[in-house]
Image (tube, rainbow, N blue to C red):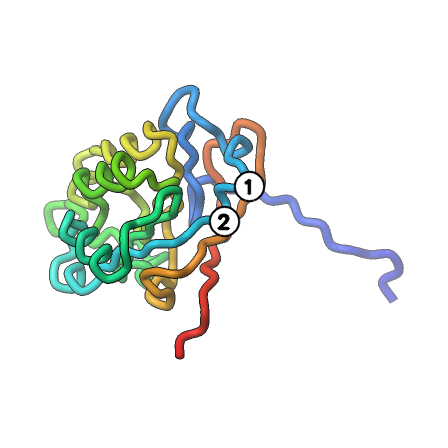
Amino acid sequence: SKGDAFQVHHYAFVGQWGTHVDPPVHFIDGGRSIDQLPVAEMLLPLVILDISDRVAADPDATPTLDDISAWETRNGRIPEKCFVALRTGWWPRWPDPVTFQNKSADGISHAPGWSKPVLKELLECRGVAAIGHEGMDTDPGRATSAGDASLEYYVLSRDCWQIELLANLDKVPEAGALIMASWPKPKAGSGFPARAVAIHEAAG
């Protein structure tokens, strides 16, 4: 009855919104853009650092070197060229800006993020390829409230890329999984919504 009718949509959106990829050029002039991230980096071993219990008690919690040591005691050395995701239990708050930013009366955001010692250990000593987290920012809320994005700058300056606003990390084992991350490749793109899927054996 509709003859040759079909649907076509025009999409317009901000690159860094929802679950998305940040390539180095997002912060670093001359850094790799989305179209320069090779397919080989879109399928990586997945390591999950879980600090969700600490975050439940203290939303300003960040990972420590002890978290890396404990993970490696259970699973062996974090592999080179892997993807390390920080599990904080924060993702169910999305997309409510009030609960996600979790601001106190003084306007300071209390939300978890990474720490410099852990990032240095992962990027400089373990040689990871990329990182990810459940929050909107690499840096914890207290830092971003002060305009400090130094941890994100550090990650991207190391020629690593990251995925923000990951979800469902609580459904993935801390070791033994793969992450498959994909996105379109606009020329010189500085960010884009991403599809990130964990591949692992079923529990039990």
Q: Is residue 113 visible?
A: yes
Q: Tell me what residue is drawn at x 29 percent, y 30 percent.
A: 153
Q: Where is residue 102 in the image (x, y as percent from the top left)?
A: 21, 54
Q: Give the label on residue 15, or none.
A: none
To which residue does mark 1 refer? 39
> Residue placed at 36% from the left, 57% from the top?
95
Q: What element carries label 1?
A: helix
Q: Nearer the viewer, residue 4 or 128?
A: 128
Identify which amino acid the numbered label 2 is placed on. Answer: Leu
Tell me the element at label 2: strand
Residue 150 image point, x, y percent: 23, 32
Residue 52 found in image quarter: bottom left
Whether residue 180 is situated above or below residue 147 in the rendered picture: below
In the rendered structure, the answer to whether residue 44 lies left or right of residue 137 reads right
Amino acid on which disc 1 is placed: Val
Number of marks: 2
Seen at 50% across and 35% down, the residue is: 37
Q: Name the residue under label 2.
A: 43
Pointers 1 and 2 in contact (C-beta within 8 Å): yes
Q: In front: 120, or 79? A: 79
Q: Where is residue 202 in the image (x, y as percent from the top left)?
A: 45, 73
